[in-house]
Amino acid sequence: METTLSFTALGGVSHSLDAAQENSRIFETALKSMNTTTLSILEIPKEGFFWLAGGIRADGLRNARIVIDGTLKFVDDRSGWPTKEKKKKGKVPLDTIEG
């Protein structure tokens, strides 16, 4: 038995730099949902490219496959990445997307 997740069906938005943080949150949420006893497949469709911000993390994935037919692009300006306020350091990029 396997489960297939479509990035666009989960809400991923193609060709939009403004959607980078939300796309990252969706991507990480999908990865976390894949940690099951059955095979889970996350599909990135070929009909577009998807901007992502940093902070995506997935630990201990089992039975997970990511099929990238499209393109994932990461925002290269870290000021667009999700941040968290630290007392002595100010705003720093998140280790993971919190949402």
Image (cartoon, helix red, strand yellow):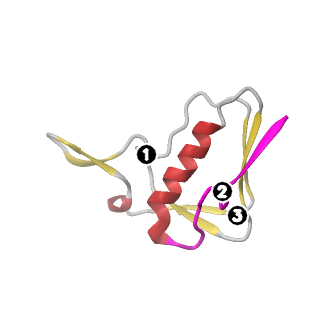
Q: Which mark is residue 47?
A: none
* Residue 90, image x, y percentages: 18, 48
Q: Residue at x 74, y 39 (%)?
A: 40
The amino acid beneath tag 2 is Phe
* Residue 96, image x, y percentages: 43, 41
* Residue 77, image x, y percentages: 38, 63
Please name the residue that numbered disc 2 is placed on.
7
Q: Residues within 10 Å of mark 3 (few under 14, many from 20)?
A: some
The amino acid beneath tag 3 is Gly
In the image, farthest residue toward the right: 1
In the image: residue 14, left or right of residue 6: left
Up-down: is 65 above or below 10?
A: above
Prevailing SS of the magenta stretch: loop
Labels 1 and 3: the sequence-earlier one: 3
What element does badge 3 sit on? loop
Q: Which mark is residue 70?
A: 3
The stretch drawn in magenta includes residue 13: yes
What element does badge 1 sit on? loop
Please name the residue that numbered disc 1 is placed on.
97
The amino acid beneath tag 1 is Ile
User: Are the residues at dot 2 and dot 3 in contact (C-beta closer than 8 Å)?
Assistant: no
Q: Residues within 10 Å of mark 1 (few under 14, many from 20)?
A: many
- Measure the C-alpha gap from mark 2 to mark 3: 11 Å
Highlighted magenta segment, given as a residue range: 1-16
Q: Residue at x 43, y 62 (%)?
A: 76
Q: Residue at x 36, y 62 (%)?
A: 80
- Measure the C-alpha gap from mark 1 to mark 2: 17 Å
Labels 1 and 2: the sequence-earlier one: 2
